[in-house]
């Protein structure tokens, strides 16, 4: 499982290596969250070129060079070249100790994964499948867009096919942190329910968790820390912060940290996060949280995502490009057999139980959530063999 965090990017330096459609989405999300964005790429999309022309972003129209990642708060590699993406991770994370590094579609070379995000103006929802099924995450996002009358951040940037400016909306930047075997420190005088919730999440994410008393901490303890959570901002002095590059959350003063932990709905590797843009919408968050918890917890989504995750490495090896992999997952998830229980006309695509929770279609989603893994695996293997034979 990944740890959900809403990052404060206001005026923080962000680097995106790559200039294609994926890089464009990364840039848009960062700008909406107030990031100070630089793009490095020989080429760029129409929108990125426009944003550079009007001065919203900086665009270095060239290949990546050694030293390019130095001094950034967050770095994202979004090129089509594995060697370039790997070089970005090695320099940014291993050499420059930048804590927030993302390599698109390569989980081992990430410290965070991006989230599917929607907003209705008052609330922001982000969806993660812990990197195991981006296609499922997108389906759930599109469902929320419809039923909540919300807008995807991915749709911004164009009007009538032409690029338009992207304004800082003061939104947090939702990410999911990869904390497996990473050192996380929790500082508190007492373990309140909020502290206990975070400690539990850290353990679920496989983090190495230290919980010393604040007066026991010394500056060198923070040198290797990836993340620090404290009940009071005073527990982490400025001198401690200067010793490391860790990201931090302060429960008593959220604006003073680099991130905060939102309200969550969790079903294994499905994580839905909800946050209000201001205090006036807190009650709305609570109502929606209760509604979505009843809808998504223990409803089979976690099992479905876990199943797709078990086949993901095989699919990555079969298809050489991100687009071909994405197309295969779409075909796999969409497929519905002709025999449908209780329905005269079968649906043409799987609804994932989103539009009809009681759907009894013979599809991958229902086979998995009802425990018929043998049939689900056989069906997946059949599609893989067919696709492999056609390559």
Image (cartoon, helix red, strand yellow):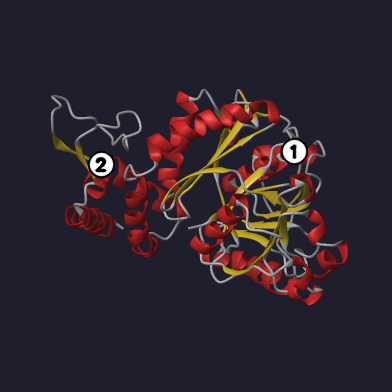
22 horizontally vs 27: left or right: left
- Whether 105 is drawn above or below 214: the answer is above
* Residue sitting farthest toward the right: 239
Find residue 15 and report its horizontal and vertical position in percent: 72, 55
- Whether 55 is drawn above or below 318: the answer is above
Disc on res. 335: 2
Residue located 67% across and 37% down the image: 47
Q: Which mark lies nearer to you, 2 or 1? A: 2
Sort mark 1 into few (<14), some (14-19) or many (20+) by Cα contacts within 10 Å.
many
Task: Give the quarter of the figure containing the C terminus.
Answer: bottom left
**Helix, strand or loop at disc 2?**
loop
Circle 1 is placed at which residue position?
51
The image quarter in which residue 321 lies:
bottom left
- Whether 223 is drawn above or below 31: the answer is below
The image quarter in which residue 346 lies:
top left
Find residue 357 and report its horizontal and vertical position in percent: 30, 32
Residue located 53% across and 57% down the image: 201
**Helix, strand or loop at disc 1?**
helix
């Amino acid at each position: 499982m990944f740890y959900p965090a809403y990052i404060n990017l206001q005026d923080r330096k962000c680097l995106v290596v790559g200039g294609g459609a994926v890089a464009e989405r990364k840039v848009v999300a960062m700008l909406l969250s107030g990031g100070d964005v630089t793009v490095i790429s020989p080429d760029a999309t129409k929108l990125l070129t426009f944003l550079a022309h009007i001065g919203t972003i900086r665009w270095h129209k060239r290949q990546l060079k050694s030293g390019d990642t130095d001094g950034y708060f967050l770095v994202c590699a979004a090129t089509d070249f594995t060697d370039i993406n790997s070089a970005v991770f090695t320099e940014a994370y291993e050499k420059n100790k930048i804590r927030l590094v993302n390599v698109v579609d390569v989980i081992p070379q990430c410290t965070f994964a991006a989230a599917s995000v929607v907003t209705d103006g008052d609330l922001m929802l982000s969806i993660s499948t812990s990197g195991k099924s981006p296609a499922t995450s997108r389906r759930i996002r599109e469902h929320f867009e419809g039923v909540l009358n919300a807008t995807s951040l991915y749709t911004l940037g164009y009007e009538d096919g032409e690029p338009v400016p992207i304004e800082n909306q003061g939104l947090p930047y939702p990410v999911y942190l990869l904390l497996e075997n990473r050192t996380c420190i929790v500082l508190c005088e007492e373990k309140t329910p909020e502290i206990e919730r975070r400690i539990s999440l850290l353990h679920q994410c496989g983090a190495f968790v230290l919980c010393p008393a604040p007066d026991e901490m010394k500056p060198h303890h923070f040198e290797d820390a990836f993340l620090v959570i404290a009940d009071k901002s005073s527990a982490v002095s400025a001198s401690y912060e200067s010793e490391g590059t860790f990201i931090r959350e302060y429960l008593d003063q959220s604006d003073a940290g680099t991130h905060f932990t939102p309200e969550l709905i969790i079903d294994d590797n499905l994580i839905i996060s909800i946050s209000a843009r201001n205090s006036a919408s807190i009650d709305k968050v609570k109502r929606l949280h209760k509604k979505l918890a009843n809808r998504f917890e223990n409803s089979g989504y976690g099992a479905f995502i876990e199943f797709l995750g078990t086949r993901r490495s095989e699919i990555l090896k079969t298809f050489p490009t991100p687009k071909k992999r994405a197309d295969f997952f779409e075909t796999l998830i969409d497929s519905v057999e002709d025999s449908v229980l209780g329905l005269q006309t079968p649906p043409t695509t799987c609804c994932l139980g989103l539009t009809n929770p009681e759907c009894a279609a013979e599809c991958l989603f229902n086979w998995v959530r009802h425990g018929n893994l043998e049939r689900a695996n056989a069906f997946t293997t059949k599609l893989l063999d067919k696709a492999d034979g056609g390559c």
